[in-house]
């Protein structure tokens, strides 16, 4: 699996062996399509990467200029793999890796109960949420994503299996666009105007 753009373009990420543990990284062509939509220059943005897996989405964002990424995954093996990938590219100082169960762990982000993020005085510009397909976690995460950690213009990108239809709006978010790529659909949400 390779980075598709930015200063790390063409560099390979460490990936788990299929027998090691269950991770379903976003396919390279879909990741490339996503970043074609987001653009090559993500300078200065802060990103929250939920269900981060290998860390590919967050590292791709760093390669394209993102200022800081918070990676969140419940799996200790994923957390270790993300750290290994960040070390490989000397990016540990631009990231924070949290081992949290989702979506319940989102409340800890909201209340900044986690000691290492208490100093963070900013909100996220971009959120990736790529939970396991057919788990129900896409909608649960979207419904539990606290607006207090977002900017009014934040973009939330949700990956789900194409057979699952996510709503056009929730209590806090409205669907701006969706793009289908075979068995995968990407949903782009923004906060509703108040």
Image: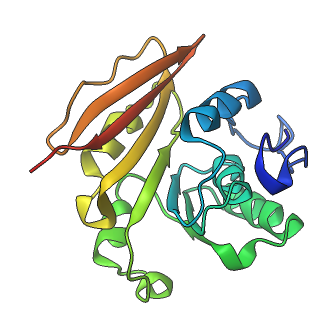
Which residue shows up at 77% across the image and 51% down it?
Answer: 6
Q: Measuring from the top left, give residue 147's x and y in whole percent.
A: 25, 58
**Colouring used for the render:** rainbow
Q: Measuring from the top left, give residue 84's x and y in whole percent.
A: 82, 64
Foreground residue, 4 or 139? 4
Which residue shows up at 87% across the image and 40% down it?
Answer: 17
Q: Measuring from the top left, give residue 73's x and y in whole percent.
A: 56, 56
174 left or right of 108?
left
Snapshot quadrant of residue 65: bottom right
Quick one: quadrant of the N terminus?
top right
Check the image and name the residue furthest to the left: 194
161 left or right of 169?
right
Q: Measuring from the top left, give residue 88's x and y in whole percent.
A: 88, 65
Which residue shows up at 51% across the image and 39% down it?
Answer: 131
Snapshot quadrant of residue 113: bottom left
- Residue 37, compared with residue 89, is above or below; it is above
Foreground residue, 156 or 73? 156
Which residue shows up at 27% across the image and 51% down it?
Answer: 144
- Residue 41, compared with residue 138, is above or below; it is below
Snapshot quadrant of residue 95: bottom right
Q: How many marks?
A: 0
């Amino acid at each position: 699996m390779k980075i598709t753009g930015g200063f790390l373009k063409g560099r390979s990420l460490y990936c788990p062996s299929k027998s090691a543990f269950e991770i379903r990284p976003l396919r390279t062509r879909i990741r490339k399509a996503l970043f074609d939509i987001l653009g090559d220059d993500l300078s200065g943005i802060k990103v929250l990467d939920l269900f981060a897996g290998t860390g590919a989405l967050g590292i791709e964002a760093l390669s394209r200029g993102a200022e800081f990424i918070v990676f969140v995954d419940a799996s200790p093996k994923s957390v270790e793999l993300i750290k290994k990938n960040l070390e490989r590219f000397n990016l540990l100082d631009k990231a924070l890796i949290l081992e949290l169960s989702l979506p319940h762990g989102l409340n800890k982000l909201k209340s900044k109960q986690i000691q290492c993020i208490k100093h963070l005085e900013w909100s996220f510009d971009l959120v990736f949420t790529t939970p396991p397909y057919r788990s129900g976690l896409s909608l649960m995460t979207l419904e539990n994503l606290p607006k207090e950690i977002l900017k009014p213009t934040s973009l939330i990108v949700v990956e789900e299996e194409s057979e699952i239809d996510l709503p056009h709006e929730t209590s806090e978010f409205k669907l701006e666009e969706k793009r289908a790529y075979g068995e995968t659909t990407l949903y782009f949400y923004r906060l509703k105007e108040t």
